[in-house]
Amino acid sequence: MLNVRILRFVLSLLFLALPVEPVFCGNNSVLDISKGLEQPLQGQPLNVNKKNNDEFIPFSKAFKKDGDFLVLTVPNEGSTQCYRYTGIGPFPVKPMRRYCLSFKSNLCQGEFTPMFSATYFLKEPQPPVFHYLYNLYKDVHYTTRMMLREWEFATPESAENMVFWIGVSGLGKRVEPGKKTVFQDLAILERGPMNGTAETRPLAGRNLLPFSDFEDQPLGPFDPDQNIFNTCKNLNLSAEVVQRDSKCLHIVKGEKGYTFPHFMTKQINFNNCWTEFSCRIRGKGTVKLGIWWRLKAVHYDYEHSPELITLTDQWQTVRARRYCVDPTTEYAACSITTQSPEVDMEVDDIALKIILP
């Protein structure tokens, strides 16, 4: 699956990496370079080593101005970390809006990968939300020529402010000091509301999966072909509809392998939509919820919620949200994913819905 994601990334950059004049200039950006962080703060990137703070680089040390350019530089401070980062913000953003990370850049020589992520600060008392945005793979993009790159993303519901993180990964090795990336017209630009399309707005609030409470399903083995359900590397996996207080789907996975049960929608282009996958679940083991986009150029582009859900003998309602900004999306698939050694779970009331502002 990783190869699929890299292939999609490479295909998109056949267009994004063309040497063209930028459509936007940095002056229209919501990104405020004057708000570079000199100290780490709450809502740091998830891949930061929590045992110490020597991954963080003060903005004044991380970026050096060179005429119209900003040069990302890792100072020689003796850090042994495989990841170094700095940040800009917080600066105001609007909730459930589509934005574009836009810049010209080239990469300096060395074994590293520039990484971009965001932390959204929501209306209190909600905790900050971290989101991964974009990677520049050195082996794909190394060049001395400035290239325009654009990557779209969407802010979550209740977002008020954002911190933009710029990091450098040493690909498992210590990040060596020195110049890493040269930026020009670094900007975050507002595109508009995440309010769906003419096709999807009438679908908002409706369950877009082919079933929900399993009451119309016959008791017994759950037919993958008939019910649009499949698994990946489904060693020691069984699924059947059972009768408890009401009907539900009983899924058991043995000690080996992992599973991605997919509940798929009909053909719908989810571009410019926020979606929410929810279900009731109980049992033993740990799971994560995922929402996958089926794309035309490659197979699936997947994302799982960061929360690891521990199952108990009591029903709990769990949810995961994901946005779509890819116009080539053909349909969605929802997954209850586990790598737990053994899982025995019951699932009911599953739904995937479009959420409008």
Image (cartoon, rainbow, N blue to C red):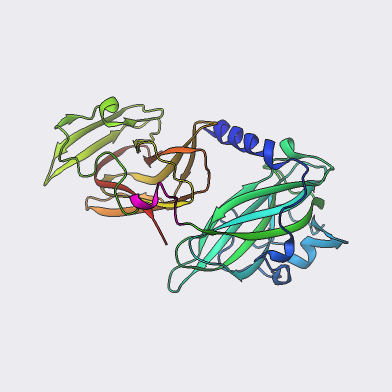
Position of residue 20 in the picture relative to residue 320 (left or right): right
Magenta stretch, residue numbers: 195-203
Position of residue 317 in the picture relative to residue 121 (left or right): left
- Asked if residue 124 lies in the magenta stretch, the reply is no
Instruction: Please determine whether, in this image, residue 76 is positioned above or below residue 265.
Output: below
Give the overall secondary structure of the magenta segment: loop
In percent of width and height, residue 321 lies at: 42, 53
Instruction: Please determine whether, in this image, residue 241 is positioned above or below residue 102.
Output: above
- Asked if residue 202 lies in the magenta stretch, the reply is yes
Q: Residue furthest front?
A: 198
Q: Is residue 126 visible?
A: yes
Position of residue 127 in the picture relative to residue 352 (left or right): right
In percent of width and height, residue 69 lies at: 83, 58
Q: Is residue 58 visible?
A: no
Which residue sits at x=40%, y=58%? 356
Which residue sits at x=19%, y=41%? 248
In percent of width and height, residue 26 lies at: 73, 62
Which residue sits at x=72%, y=67%? 33
